[in-house]
Amino acid sequence: MLNLGVLISGRGSNLRALIDACAQPGFPAKISCVIANNGSAKGLDYAKDASIPAFVIPHKDFASRQAFEEALDATMEKHDVQLVCLAGFMRLLTAWFTERWRDRLVNIHPSLLPAFPGVDVHQKVLDYGAKVTGCTVHFVRAEMDHGPIILQAVVPVLDNDTEEVLAARVLEAEHKAYPSAVRLIAEGCVNVFNERTFIAKTDDGAGIALFSPPLFSDRP
Ligand code: GRF
């Protein structure tokens, strides 16, 4: 069983997807603690409903980013966290933290990185006219939305999509992608080499790291 620490700032739907996955028989991870950087994060309710230790550590209470991160770190060490999952955590992390948790710290981002890092992702995808988008689970480095990619899920962008409709389609993919990535890590299938990941999985193959829409095979 891999012990997860989940960091949130808001809605917490990816936290809920991880909680649901961990409740499935045979899932190789469990959530040891949830930390929010603000007390109004709705996702805290999911943790409480599932009887998972949940903490509010307000970043505003600390004089520096690192002092805040030291408090996060101490809470996770106390709960024997082995993998930190960022799930809508809206604080940039310093190199002190990302190096301390190197290759034990993952994030989910709602685009196919390295395209569309940052915020307002879905509107940027629509404005650009991309035909596919999706989500990316990656190990975290100090640079924002950057680090070795573990798994990506692809969804189509349709002509009449609004930002909300597209966000909902991507979010549905996120809720499958994040637990899948955590499972791969917990099973020891994810190796990082030269800042790329390689997925060792003999039964269903490396293709597990990509979810994709069907292609139009009958047209050139
Ligand atoms: C998700 O879209 C995630 O990819 C991004 O922030 C959003 C968090 O949503 N990093 P939720 O709080 O998990 O519902």
Image (spheres, helix red, strand yellow):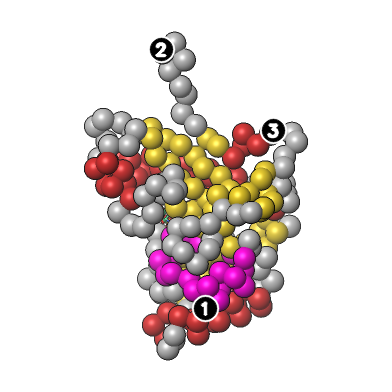
Closer to the eye: label 3 or 2: 2
On residue 69, which mark appears?
Answer: 1
C-alpha separation, residue under disc 3 versus residue under disc 2:
29 Å
Left or right of 120? Residue 32 is right
For this orientation, the residue located farthest to the front is 194
The residue under the point 53% across, 57% down is 147
Q: Quadrant of residue 103?
A: bottom right
Left or right of 31? Residue 60 is left
Is 42 rendered above or below residue 37?
above
Is 220 rendered above or below residue 113?
above
The residue under the point 70% across, 59% down is 2
Q: Earlier in the sequence, mark 1 or mark 3?
A: 1
Give the amino acid at mark 2: Arg
Where does label 2 land, which residue? 219
Residue toward you, 199 or 9: 199
Left or right of 100? Residue 112 is left
Give the amino acid at mark 1: Glu
Residue interval drawn in magenta: 84-102
Residue 216 coordinates in the image, percent (x, y)? 43, 18
C-alpha separation, residue under disc 1 versus residue under disc 3:
38 Å
Where does label 3 land, which residue? 204
Is 115 rendered above or below residue 68?
above
The residue under the point 65% across, 37% down is 206
Q: Is residue 211 visible?
A: yes
Residue 149 coordinates in the image, percent (x, y)? 55, 49
SS category of the residue bearing label 1: helix
